[in-house]
Amino acid sequence: MTAEEMKNELQKRLKESRFIHSLGVADTAVKLSKKFGADEKKAYIAGLLHDAAREFKNEDLIFEAKKRSIEIDEVERATPLLLHAPIGAVLVKERYGVIDEEISLAIATHTVAGRNMTKLQKIIYFADMIEPNREYPGVNELREFAQNHTLDEIMLKALSESIIFVIEKNGLLHPDTIAARNELLKKN
């Protein structure tokens, strides 16, 4: 499937606001890839398809994960929305013919992050947070921060902001998010 065919198929499957968000993530990922020296084509595809599994209702995500033999941890069981990332990593193979493991991995980790993240994984995680259609308190500061900092510095700030957000919502922190942040702190 070409990128254009993927875009057309995705548009049929997602609600309009989610599709517009996906286009924003794809464009932002390309810009970040140029800045940080990652593969722009992979960044575009991963950004475009990162929310492919959002076509499923939240209440169906556990079933969809089990159907694809995806392990479900206790945090994901309590917060099934997080499963759209690992489901999406498999769905892009099934539905869009994407066989690139780096793209699948970037999609799989775009919600909670993880250890040993590649440039592409970091770019998709961050692009999802700052794409132009996102509006939340602090997003403009994150966008500005990205202008003059390294990818690891950006990720450390993004993960910290994400953790604070989850704590303020009294939500469960995913161990992969904590592990990703700790790993970056140990590097510096």
Image (tube, rainbow, N blue to C red):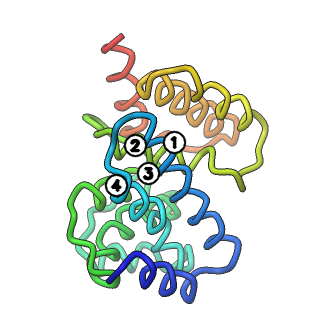
Q: Camera-side residue: 109 or 144?
A: 144
Q: Tell me the residue that label 4 is attached to.
A: 73
Which three-letter amino acid code belongs to the residue tagged 3? Answer: His
31 or 158, nearer to the observer: 31
Estimate the x, y position of residue 136 in percent, counting from the top left.
76, 44
Identify the residue under disc 1: 126
Label 1: state its secondary structure.
Answer: helix
Q: Is residue 135 left or right of residue 2?
A: right
Residue 5, compared with residue 81, is above or below; it is below
The residue at 50%/67% (across/down) is 51
The N terminus: image quadrant:
bottom left
Residue 138: x, y in percent?
Answer: 74, 33
Q: Residues within 10 Å of mark 1 (few under 14, many from 20)?
A: many
Callout 4: SS: loop
Q: Is residue 164 above or below residue 58?
A: above
**Numbered circle sitting on residue 110:** 3
Secondary element type, mark 2: loop
The crowd level at tag 4 (other Cα within 10 Å; few <14, some 14-19, many 20+) is few
Q: Earlier in the sequence, mark 1 or mark 4?
A: 4
Q: Earlier in the sequence, mark 4 or mark 2?
A: 4
Count residues near mark 2 (Cα–Cα under 10 Å), then give few for <14, some for 14-19, many for 20+. many
Q: Which residue is mark 2?
A: 113
Which residue is pictured at 46% across the width and 59% down the height? 47
